[in-house]
Image (cartoon, coloured by chain):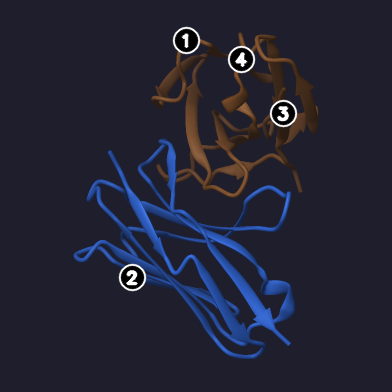
Amino acid sequence: EPEVTQTPSHQVTQMGQEVILRCVPISNHLYFYWYRQILGQKVEFLVSFYNNEISEKSEIFDDQFSVERPDGSNFTLKIRSTKLEDSAMYFCASSELAGGIETQYFGPGTRLLVL
Amino acid sequence: GENVEQHPSTLSVQEGDSAVIKCTYSDSASNYFPWYKQELGKRPQLIIDIRSNVGEKKDQRIAVTLNKTAKHFSLHITETQPEDSAVYFCAASMSASKIIFGSGTRLSIRP
């Protein structure tokens, strides 16, 4: 069964550094998402992406965040200047258009630790 | 925007008994309600979902109900087993849109 994949599984970085988190959505899916989950808390929406542009973003997704689909398979989240509070698990998700309502499938996550 | 409330935050049931988790949502435009199970350190896994044109859906030991008028939906797990122990998240969404998650319920199954 196809799955969303993410790399790296873990990333440790210094505050102020840039990080790029990578995702490979399921191949026939059209909608892509990033979520984050701070340890012990709920999953929070960051951004959705369709047709090569952002379709929606949350208040968390400020100017230090950006997303890109650099080729036909990868979907990336860049954090330009990481802060301590960016430490979290970041999940990528994808969905296909099915009857107008899409089921989102999550990747295994990247655990980001900012020191 | 949409807000999803979930309770209880923790739930402990005897193996074989039933577990019920309840959620409410605020935005009447939400039309899709998935439930995710998350084991420690793992991804959220979709276990069942319900669309707004359906009042109830069942899949083996898991069932979900939706009351659109009251904006309530709930998850029922019958004949619980040790492997049901996990954190369960309810969520609400509109078509092709973000999923708004509840705060989660940590379910523990006592042997």
Can residue A73 be seen by looking at this rendering?
A: no
Return the residue at label 1: A63
Q: Using residue A114 as the reference point, say whether residue B47 is left or right of it.
A: left
**On the picture, is A112 further left or further right than B17?**
right
Marks 1 and 3, how far apart at CA:
20 Å
* Mark 1 residue type: Asp
Q: Which chain carries label 1?
A: A
x and y percentages locating residue A100 in the rendered image: 40, 42
Label 4 and label 3: CA atoms lie apart by: 12 Å
Whether residue A48 is situated above or below residue B80 in the rendered picture:
above
Above or below for B71 versus B85: above
Please tell me whether mark 4 or mark 3 is closer to you in this view.
3
Q: Which chain carries label 3?
A: A
Which image quadrant: the C terminus of chain B?
bottom right
- What residue is rendered at 68% in x and 35% in y? A26
Disc number for residue B55: 2
> Residue at image x 58%, y 79%?
B12
Of residue A78 and residue B47, the one placed in the foreground of this image is: A78
Whole-number angstrom distance, CA of label 4 to CA of label 1: 9 Å
User: Which shade is chain A?
Assistant: brown
Q: What element carries label 4?
A: strand
Residue underneath mark 3: A113
Closest to the camera, between mark 3 and mark 2, is: 3
Three-letter amino acid code at the position of disc 4: Ile
Question: Where does the image place residue B51, in percent across and percent down from the top left?
Answer: 38, 57
Dot 2 falls on which chain? B
Which is nearer the eye, B66 or A16? A16
Query: What amino acid type should be assigned to the residue bearing mark 3?
Result: Leu
Query: How many C-alpha atoms fall within 10 Å of the one at disc 1: few (<14), some, or many (≥20)?
Result: few
Q: Which of marks 4 and 1 is nearer the N terminus?
A: 1
Say if mark 1 contacts mark 3, CB within 8 Å: no
